[in-house]
Amino acid sequence: MPDESRPHQPHQPPPRRSRLTRRGRLVLLCGALLGIGLATMVIEPLLPQEEAPEKPRRLLIPEGWRAAQVYAAVDRELRLPAGTTKSAAATAALDLPAEAKGNPEGYLFPATYPVTTKSTPADVLAFMVRTANRNLATKAVADGGRAHGMTPYQTATLASVIEAEADNPADMGKVSRVVHNRLAKSMPLQMDSTVNYALGRNTVDTTLADTRIDHPFNTYARQGLPPTPIDSPGLRAMAAAVAPTPGDWLFFVTVKPGDTRFSATYEEHKRHVAEFNRLRAATAPPARTGPPPAQAGPPAKAPAVK
């Protein structure tokens, strides 16, 4: 029986769960996204920022530059005190042949190299030497050198003379032939470029006194190739060194830019030299006082007339 003594409690349905309307859900989602965005804005400045990659600068080494010029260019491009790269070359453990005795002359290959603020002189020099070795090891150069009985170092040395002597790339094969012909006849090379290297200069005149200096690089007084390369030869000079143009030439002189005369006889060569001197005299400034040079020749282009 129902208990009449207790007051009657009306029946109440269970509480209903509140349901979000579509608008409410949208408001809640936007709020969450806004909160995440604000949190990201606060946290992001605290995280380390990745630096944009540094754009490399371009270091250009032209054909025919001597090591001293290359060292100076590296110092300038890396913004280092003068002499830094030259000092680094002595301790950089470069991949040079034993014949080089640690001297990278001839192996600082002419090209354009990328450098950054993280580049070091040793890194740049090593890159140049690797590039030179790679070019000397190309099949045409390596096979040609072996055919002429030359080591890669001798190829680099001959190529450096060709680089200095040829008025333009088209003459490199002929200059190479003159060198090969003179070597075959045990004639001194008589190259002004090697004398200039010995004297640390570049000049249009080689005097009789110059050709008599007692120096390993004086190819007027000593037979054979110079003891080391005299500059940085490019691939075209390397190729010419091992593949000379056929011919019987023993002399050459650049009468004027773009006009190099090759001769098989000394008499013919003297006529070409006389024309050079005539053209030069016609455009020369007023004569200076004092004795004239004992001999005149184009800049490092021909055995001078003695």
Image (cartoon, helix red, strand yellow):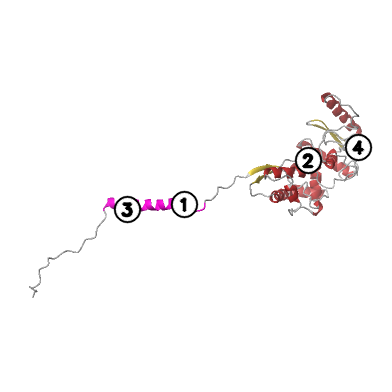
Contact, mark 1 vs mark 3 (Cβ under 8 Å): no
Tell me where residue 293 appears, x and y as whole percent.
Answer: 89, 31
- For mark 1, what is the residue? 44
Tell me where residue 101 appears, x and y as whole percent.
Answer: 81, 53
Q: Residue at x 43, y 50 (%)?
A: 41
| SS label for mark 3 | helix
Q: Residues within 10 Å of mark 3 (few under 14, many from 20)?
A: few
Q: CA distance from mark 4 to mark 3?
A: 98 Å
Residue 277 sits in which quadrant? top right
Mark positioned earlier in the residue sequence (1 or 2):
1
Please state which amino acid type lies under the numbered disc 2: Glu
Residue 278's label in the rendered image is none
Q: Which residues are magenta?
A: 21-48
Q: CA distance from mark 4 to mark 1?
A: 75 Å
- For mark 3, what is the residue? 28
Please state which amino acid type lies under the numbered disc 1: Glu
Mark positioned earlier in the residue sequence (1 or 3):
3
Q: Residues within 10 Å of mark 4 (few under 14, many from 20)?
A: few
Residue 223 sits in which quadrant? top right
Please state which amino acid type lies under the numbered disc 3: Leu
- Work out whether residue 107 or residue 46 is closer to the camera in this orientation and state it: 46
Q: CA distance from mark 2 to mark 4?
A: 25 Å
- For mark 4, what is the residue? 209
| SS label for mark 2 | helix
- For mark 2, what is the residue? 163
Q: CA distance from mark 1 to mark 2?
A: 58 Å
